Every structure is written in C-alpha cells, then in structure tokens.
Image (spheres, rainbow, N blue to C red):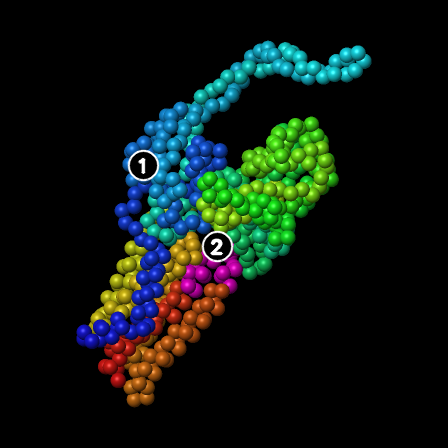
Amino acid sequence: MSSKIKSVFTNVRVIVFLIFVLLAIVAIHPSFGVEGVAIRNVISNSSASDAGISSPKASSNPMSREVITMVDNIPIKDMSDWERVVSSMTPNRTYTIHTVNGPKSFYRIATRFKTEERPTGRLINMTEEVVKEFKVNGSVVNRTVNQTVRVNETQTVYLGMEDSGLRVYEAPTNNLRKGLDIQGGTRVLLQPETKITSEEMGLLIDSLKERLNVFGLSDVVVREASDLSGNQYVLVEIAGANEDEVKELLAKQGKFEARIANQTVFRGGTDITYVCRTAQCSGIDSRAGCGQTQGGYACRFQFAISLNPDAAQRQADATRSIPVTGTGTDRYLSEPIVLFLDNKEVDRLNIAEELRGRPVTDISISGSGVGKTQSEAVAVSLENMRRLQTILITGSLPVKLNIVQTSNISPVVGEAFLKNSILVGVLAILVVSIVILIRYRRWDISLPILVTSAGEVFLILGFAAIVGWNLDMAAIAGIIVSIGTGVDHQIVIADETLHGEKERLDWKRRLKAAMFIIISAYVTVCAAMTPLLFGGAGLLKGFALITIAGFSVGVFISRPAFAAMVEILVGEEAR
C-alpha cells in the first residue's frame, strides 16, 4: 500500500494537479486574523483627500488595499470600532489615522464644521466697489468708487461636523473579489439611445469611468454588454453606493467647461472639435522630455486639441487683458485655465504667453508626471495625459443613455448567501463522498473523489482571483455546477475502470473510453455556455465564464489526476 501511495505522489499528472492547486492558493492569498478597515474610496475635495489619502485603483487586488488599523492610538479591528471612533469625532480637530499597505504609514485628517449660509429675512446696507466711467477733459476714464446697496442679510448656521470623505469596509481576508450580490451596492443597466460603433462604445465607457472617479466612486465596474438580439448595453456596478446618487450621476449626459478668470471660454462637445490620442500628436514632450528632481524624476507630456472658431475667439477675448507672469521661457498668464466636469474642478493648466488675445484654434495641452524612477515617471505622465484627454472628451457623452434597470442590493443578504453557499458546498462534497463510499465500499475510490473535488474548488477560485472576476450569485452557481459535474465525471471514470466488460476491454482501454465521454461532455458544455457570455445583457456572463473555467480546469488538470490515482490504486485489480 505504501508503494501505491508513493506512486500516486510521484505521478506527473498528480504533481501537475498539486502544483496548480498550490498556485491557486497563492493567488487567493487567504489570511487569518486580519484586523482593520480597508479604504474603499475617497470623496474629492474632502478633508481625507486634503490629507493625501487617495482612492485605490479599481484594478488593485483586495489584499493590496490600504487598511486603517488605528485612529489616535485607538485600535481599529472591524467596522464597529471604526463607526464608534468616527461617531465620537469633533470638529476643528486633527486626527491621526495609521494605515498599512499604503504609501504612508499615517495621515493627519483635520475635521471641519459643516456650515450653511441662510437668509434672515432682513435687508441691510452694504458698501461695494464698482467701476464707473467718467469724462475728464473730454476723455472717458474708469474709476473705482464705493456705493451703497441693499442686500438680503444672511447668517452662518453650523450643521455639525463635515463628512471626512472616507468610505471604508471590512478589511479583506483574501484576494477574491465579491460581486454586488455579496458585498452590496448598486447595479445599473444603461442603453445608448442610438446604435454606436465599437470606438464610440470604448469612449463612452472611458467617459463613464472618469465621471464616476471624479465623484469619488472608485470601486466601480463599467463594461460593455449585449443580448442575442444585438441590443447594446453598458453595465455599471458600484459597491457601497446608494441607488439615488448613482442614477443622478449616470442619467446626465454631462457638462464640461473651461473657465478663465471665472469666465467660460469653451465647453466639451461642440466647442472641442478634436482631441489627439495618437502617437503622432500626443505623448512625452520631446522638447522637455524627462528630468531628475529632488525626489526622483519628472516627465512632461503634451497633446494637441482643436477648438471651433467661436471658442477660440472667446478665449482670445478672455485673455486679452490678463497680465503675464514668469521669466525667460517660462512666461505664462497670471490666470490659469480651469477645467470643470459637471461643475466640479478636475484640473487647471497654465496659459502660454503667446496665446494671449489670439483666437488660436489648434493649441497644445501639456502637463507632467513624477515617479521614483524614470520609467515610473513616464508611466505616470502618460496615465495623467490619458486621464486629461478623457476629461476633455467627456464634457458631453457621445450618446444619451437611458436607464433600463437599477437594483440596490443589501450586503446583509449577500453575506448570508455566501456563508450558506460555503456551508452547503462543504456538506455536499462530504455527503457525495459518503454515498460513493457506501456505493463502492472502497476508500481508494471515495478519497480521490473528495481530494480532486476540493482541489477543483481552489482551482476555480484561483482563476477568479487571477483574472479579477467578481464572485456574484451567478458565478457561485457556476462553481456549484462545475463541481457537481466533476463528481459525475469521476464516477464515470470509476465505473468504467471497475465494471467494464473484462473479456473484451482491459482497464486502460475502459479508462480511455471514460475520458472520451468526459471530453465530449466538455465540448458540449462550452458550446452551450458560449451564447450566455453575450446574452442576458451581460448579467449571465459570470455564470458562463466560471462554468467554462471550472470545466476546463477539471478536464485538463483534475480529471487526469483522478484517473492517474484510480490507475495506480485500483488498476491492478481491474486487470
């Protein structure tokens, strides 16, 4: 018996199976005893944002998220600790937040009073400076004079402490991404009002991501979807956001404005006729390039845009009387051009001296990015350039979107479903193993089935962790289907090995016949699941993808390993 066990663990197919299971566990990165709350996102222009805390990238692994472990030396173990500390905070104080996995180990957040100006209902006299024209010796001159006006009196009302802008959740214990069905949030299905091209769809998705990021919603999934009728959709999933605020953001087509001295000079859409995104007219500025700074490297980017003649004239009129500042070649107008998306400032740029008072339609936009190494600075610079290009284009979405369906999912229901699914899955595998043990009365059949079934679970979850797929109810259903079918395939292998026609086929030929049945079933399932990847407006994609992945790892990794175990443990007896 010991020689058989040794043969099992030295078999190539079993070794390959165990290696893939180990890699899957590494990808899942299970951790125990994790304490703290992870940062989900940071609201723009909040006290947390001012402290230097940034929202995590949507593509970042859950275990790499920045985790808050302490506030003013008070340990934060879970959400209840965080809520208790936040509720005890008072305005006009500075709190130190300690974190791990982030660029800094601590941040200082200054809490502020939330105020509002409300009218008292009384009129009062106020003195203001105005510019009036006077004639002096026949010439018209402008002079600033004081005049008294009647205005509505207002008073400042204190409404408690202003929101810090931090959105947190329980610190993750693995790299598995939870879908909205599990962690809660809002799902919105949007449909373009008219048919659009694939290029316009890509631009639309970039625009929606940028808009949601501008509003501080970073834990976002935006992807294209369709149905078998050819209808186009955009599926948006946002964790930790309520339905009303998401609908408010997505229902608008958008408004982009560029202002100089608080005067709008051009808007997105019709005013910006072209934004270069090709290598011929965008990228790292060859004239400035990259240079070394005190903290590392800085690289400058540039790209071309075109304005229509009316917008160019408005810019010329707005800049005609603005003074110039700076020396040498770095001479700019004293007023920058400020970019607003849906009335929220997203960027500000210096205006070159040569553009003052000139109705230029073709202009160059520039900026920079910094990093510890030159390659990092180049990557950051290009990322900033793409973001700015997207902002200039997203002033108005390329097409109006209609909200087809919205759903708000409670995290309580999702967590209960996940726990029940895990419990039912474990019990199902145990019950199946017991039934197989009773059926065959052999541990050398039931134990390999139990081992390979458990290994398949890790392989599927490892695949989901690597590709970053969100595990929702549909995906979990796909896992259950894959494991159930895997057990069925293993029974086929066992039966073909033990109960074939001995006088006509030896046990190796029966094993090959079983594998032929399994391969045929695999091809059939892939053919059946492929339409679901594109059907149901993308809502069934998780089920189809995980089912195909589960069948694939089973057919190519775990089934051969199980067959090798059966071949070694019972093959000799089946001769």
Viewport quadrant of the C terminus: bottom left
Residue 237 visible in the current orientation: no
Name the residue: 33% across, 79% down. Answer: 511
Q: What's under tag 1, amino acid-wise?
A: Met
| Residue 386 numbered tag | none
Horizontal and vertical percent for residue 129?
A: 64, 15
The chief SS type of the magenta part is helix
Inspect the magenta stretch and tell me whether residue 285 lies in it: no
Name the residue: 57% across, 47% down. Answer: 289
Horizontal and vertical percent for residue 572?
A: 24, 81
The residue carrying mark 1 is: 70
Name the one closer to the observer, 24 or 538. 24
Viewport quadrant of the N terminus: bottom left
Q: Identify the magenta region.
A: 531-549
Outermost residue toward the front in this view: 328
Horizontal and vertical percent for residue 311?
A: 70, 37
Inspect the magenta stretch and tell me whether residue 537 lies in it: yes
| Residue 539 numbered tag | 2
Residue 520, by quadrant, is bottom left
Name the one closer to the observer, 459 or 436. 459
Name the residue: 34% across, 51% down. Answer: 174
